[in-house]
Amino acid sequence: MDQSPVVIITGASSGIGEATARLLGAHGYRLVLAARRQERLERLAEEIRGADGQAVGLATDVTRLEDIQRLVEHTMERFGQVDVLFNNAGFGRLDWLEHLDPVRDVARQVHVDLLGLIHTTQAVLPYMIARRNGHIINVASLAGHIAVPTYSVYAASKFGVRGFTDALRREMGVWGVHVSGVYPGSVATEFELHTGARRKTGLRTPGWLRLSAEQVAGEVLRLIRRPRRQVVLPRVMLLAVWLNALVPGVVDFAVRKGFVERERS
């Protein structure tokens, strides 16, 4: 009987989710890949199976409760357990708040990035509690620690993910269920293609601070093997997190002078 852990990965069709699926598949994990783009999921699942891994893809929109329920039911029917839920699905629309569309950019962003994550977690928890075992890993963002201009709704969602992750970790410890948060900074993925961000100044994250999806995937694998409360990536950004917490007024001034006034002029 195969005893390798079963992992559900949302947002598996590209970026961090895709890289994590490849890495976990190569290490023998049994995978259920979820995203809206079925063709991409099937190609990825076939690739993993072709390398002697185990993976199935299921088209899933995390804003639809029926899709989430079907995802979890399919996983239980196929494998009989859920060991890890990797909540990775999400997107960002970055602009000044007054320019964001109330439905497409605000409501949907919160629904996917926060509510979808919460609802997917709700669906798997009964099975983990019954087995007294499991691990919920929530992908947030550095924006869940440091809120910056044009990230208002995205940061609100990711701050929500951080609060949800912390509260759930304290709820679930008695059941043997681990809960972890992953807080990456800039990652070279398709994310940037869909943000709608416009920069007069051309300011971008320096190349030496940018992560690859594979780097984040490697940290996720380490987190599965050794559960921790949170991982901030790259680790040097912990300094920015502490600075923002200790002297927020200084950060406010620097952001206003270095970014907002230049972009708003």
Image (cartoon, rainbow, N blue to C red):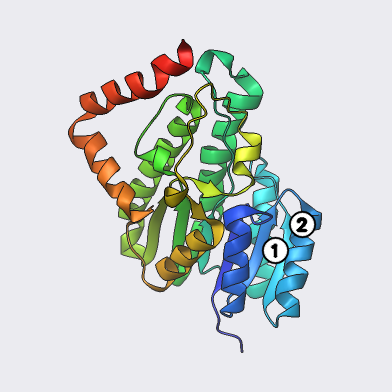
Mark 2: amino acid: Arg
At 54% across and 40% down in the image, what residue appears? Answer: 113
**x and y percentages locating residue 57 in the rendered image:** 73, 62
User: Where 262 falls versus 13 (above or below)?
Assistant: above
Considering only vertical position in the picture, is 244 above or below 84? above
Quarter of the image that includes the N terminus: bottom right
Residue situated in front as seen by the camera: 76 or 30 = 30
Q: Is residue 129 visible?
A: no
**Relative to residue 212, is residue 152 depicted above or below?**
above
- Find residue 74 and name its label: 1
| Residue 146 visible somewhere in the drawing | yes
Q: Label 2: state its secondary structure.
A: helix
Q: Position of residue 222 (x, y in %)?
A: 42, 70
Residue 87 in the image: x percent, y percent?
53, 53
The residue sitting at 55% across, 57% down in the picture is 213
Kindly identify which numbered label has been placed on residue 40: 2
Q: Quadrant of residue 73?
A: bottom right
Point out the tag, 1 or 2, that comes first from the N-terminus.
2
At label 1, which amino acid type do we have? His
- The residue positioned 38% from the left and 53% from the top of the image is 234
Q: Residue lying farthest left?
A: 246
Residue 181 appears left or right of 242: right
Image coordinates for residue 90, horizontal then vertical, percent = 58, 43
Judge left or right: residue 154 versus residue 170: right
Tell me the CA gap for discs 1 and 2: 19 Å
How crowded is the residue under tag 2: few (<14 C-alpha within 10 Å), some, or many (20+)?
Answer: some
